[in-house]
Amino acid sequence: MSLTTLFLYRKQMGLITTGPDTRTSFATIIASKAIEAYCGRTFALTARRQWLDGTGYDRMLLPEWPITALNGVAISGVEVITISSTFTQAVAATTDTGLNLSWFDTAGDSQSSTLAFATYKTITTLAAAVALVTGWSATVASGCGAYPTALLKPWMSGPCSANETLDFFIPDNWVQARVAADSNRMIIRSGSWASTFNMVGGHDCGQPIFPEGNANIFVWYAAGYTEPVDDALSSALTTAGNVPEDLTAVANVVAKAAMDAANISAGGIQSESIGNYSYTLSSDLKAAVDSAIAANAQALTPYRRLA
C-alpha cells in the first residue's frame, strides 16, 4: 500500500501545483515499500487467520496491528482429515491456499499434485479430490466433512508413505477474547472460566490463559491501515484513510530524498510498472532511500515488528 499520496506529498513540501505527476507518485510508492520492508510489516488492512505461539498468560501480542476486528480465537485444534498413500516415499503438506501431495512413483520419478482450497472448499470435497490422485487416499473424521478447508492449519507437513498416515487440523475450543482497551495490538482472554486456567504454585488462580505452545493458538482477525486516495487532479483527498500522520510524514521525507538525490527522471528508476508497483532502483537511489529511512529510524520505531 502507499502511506502517502501526491497531494499529501505536495502539501508537506509546500508545493501548489496540481495534476498528475507519474515520477513523484512513483517516488511515494517506492518510499512506502521501503518503509514496509524496514518495519518488517505489511501495513494494508487485511483479514488474517493465523496460528500463533501461546504465551502461557492471559494476553498476547498479535503480529499485525492496528487490530480493526477480532473475529475469533481458538486454543487448540481437532483432527478432521487423515491422508495416506501407497508409495514408499511420499509427503503431504498444507499451505495457506492448498494441499500439496508429493511422491516418487514406481519408476523413481518425482510427482506432485496441488489441491487448491478455493476449488475444494470443504473437507469432504478435498478428501474426494485426494482419492482421485492415483495411490492416495483420505479419511474424513466423523461429523467434520462440512468444515471449510480454509481453516486447515497451514504449513503442516509429514510423511504419507505406505503404512504411514498424516492428520490435519482445524481450530477447536473457541474461547472468549477481546482487544485490550489500551492497545491496538494486544488481545486478552476473557469470559468463561470453563477451560484452561493459569496455575500458580500448583493452585488454580482463576485466570483463563492462552496455553503456552508452538503455533497452538488460532486467531482470526483484521489489522492494518486504509490508505489515502487522491482525487483525479491530486488537489485533495477523496479518501482520507487512517495512516498515522507521522508515518505519512516520514514517507514524504523518504520520497523527497529519493527525488533530490537520484533525479528519478534521469534514470534513478531503471524500470517501472505503476500498476503492480514493479521497479528496479539504481544504486544511488537505493542509497538515498536507505539513508533517509535511517535518519528517521526513531519515528519509525513504534511501527516496526520487533517481536
Image (tube, rainbow, N blue to C red):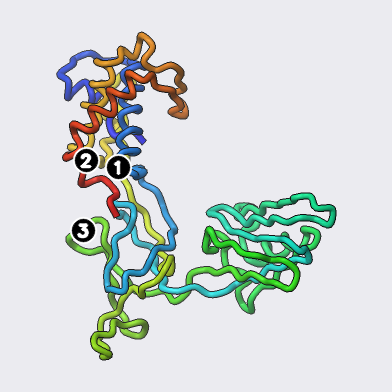
Which residue is painted at 43% across and 63% down in the image? Answer: 51
Kind of residue indicated by mark 1: Cys
Determine the secondary structure under disc 1. Answer: helix
Q: Which residue is mark 3?
A: 183
The residue carrying pointer 3 sits among few (fewer than 14), some (14 to 19) or many (20 or more) residues within 10 Å by Cα, namely few
* Quarter in which the N terminus is drawn: top left
Label 2 near label 1: C-beta < 8 Å? Answer: yes
Q: Is residue 66 above or below residue 80?
A: above
Q: From this viewpoint, which residue is outermost toward the right? A: 107
Which of the two marks, 1 or 3, is nearer to us in this view? 1
The label on residue 39 is 1
Q: Residue at x 32, y 42 (%)?
A: 226
Question: Under tag 3, what secondary structure?
Answer: loop
Q: Which residue lies at the image location 47% right of the left edge and 29% below the top edge?
A: 276
The vertical placement of 281 against 111, above or below, is above
| Residue that mark 2 sits on | 300
Assign a secondary structure to mark 2. helix
Of badges 3 and 2, the one in the foreground is 2
3D distance between C-alphas at marks 1 and 2: 7 Å
